[in-house]
Image (spheres, rainbow, N blue to C red):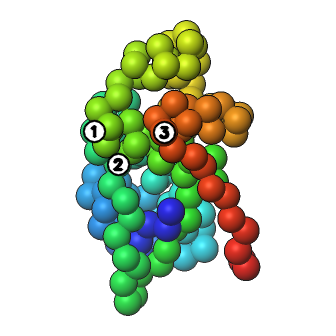
């Protein structure tokens, strides 16, 4: 998942980052590199808030001219994809817990973007939704 970000000079000699897909999110950095590094944290935070509030986490729009692509860490992407699939199917956390025969805190942690969940747990949750996780390796 690569989300578009727009960088612009801020009034205090920093670089402002905004995200077309998440109008409520913004961050800054001392320069472009620093700003893009902080952009990942900003995206994860806004997604975590949306998940907690049971709101939509959109698929990334295309990165346009003059924009930068901000790539989510693989574990975050897997968790967001699980959350999106749950919403698409109308499956609540309690429903998923019953399907997996897990306790609710286990499902809560699975959707917590700050928790280092195991990949096999995400795979099990996706399988309970009739889906599978596909991992690829690409040139950097």
Q: Nearer the viewer, residue 24 or 113?
A: 113
Tell me the SS state at disc 1. Answer: loop
Q: Is residue 62 visible?
A: yes
Q: Which residue is mark 2?
A: 57
26 above or below 140? above
Q: Look at mark 1 in the image and give the residue it sits on.
A: 55
Q: Is residue 94 left or right of residue 74?
A: left
Mark 3 Cα shell of 10 Å, populated few (<14), some (14-19), many (≥20): few
Q: CA distance from mark 3 to mark 2?
A: 20 Å
The spot of residue 63 in percent (x, y) is: 40, 79
Give yes or no for contact between labels 2 and 1 (Cβ–Cβ under 8 Å).
Answer: yes
1 vs 3, front mark: 3
Percent x, y of residue 61: 34, 70
* SS for dot 3: loop
Question: What residue did someone put label 3 on?
Answer: 130
**Lower sequence index among marks 1 and 3:** 1
Nearer the viewer's eye, disc 3 or disc 2? 3
């Amino acid at each position: 998942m690569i989300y578009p970000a727009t960088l612009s000079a801020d009034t205090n000699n920093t670089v402002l980052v905004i995200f077309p897909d998440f109008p409520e999110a913004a961050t800054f950095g001392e320069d472009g590199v620093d700003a893009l590094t902080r952009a990942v944290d900003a995206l994860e935070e806004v997604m975590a808030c949306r998940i907690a509030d049971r709101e939509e986490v959109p698929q990334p729009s295309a990165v346009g001219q003059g924009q930068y692509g901000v790539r989510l860490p693989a574990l975050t992407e897997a968790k967001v994809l699980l959350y999106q699939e749950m919403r698409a199917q109308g499956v609540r956390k309690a429903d998923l817990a019953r399907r997996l025969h897990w306790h609710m805190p286990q499902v809560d942690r699975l959707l917590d973007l700050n928790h280092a969940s195991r990949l096999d747990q995400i795979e099990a949750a996706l399988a309970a939704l009739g889906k599978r996780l596909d991992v690829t390796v690409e040139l950097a």
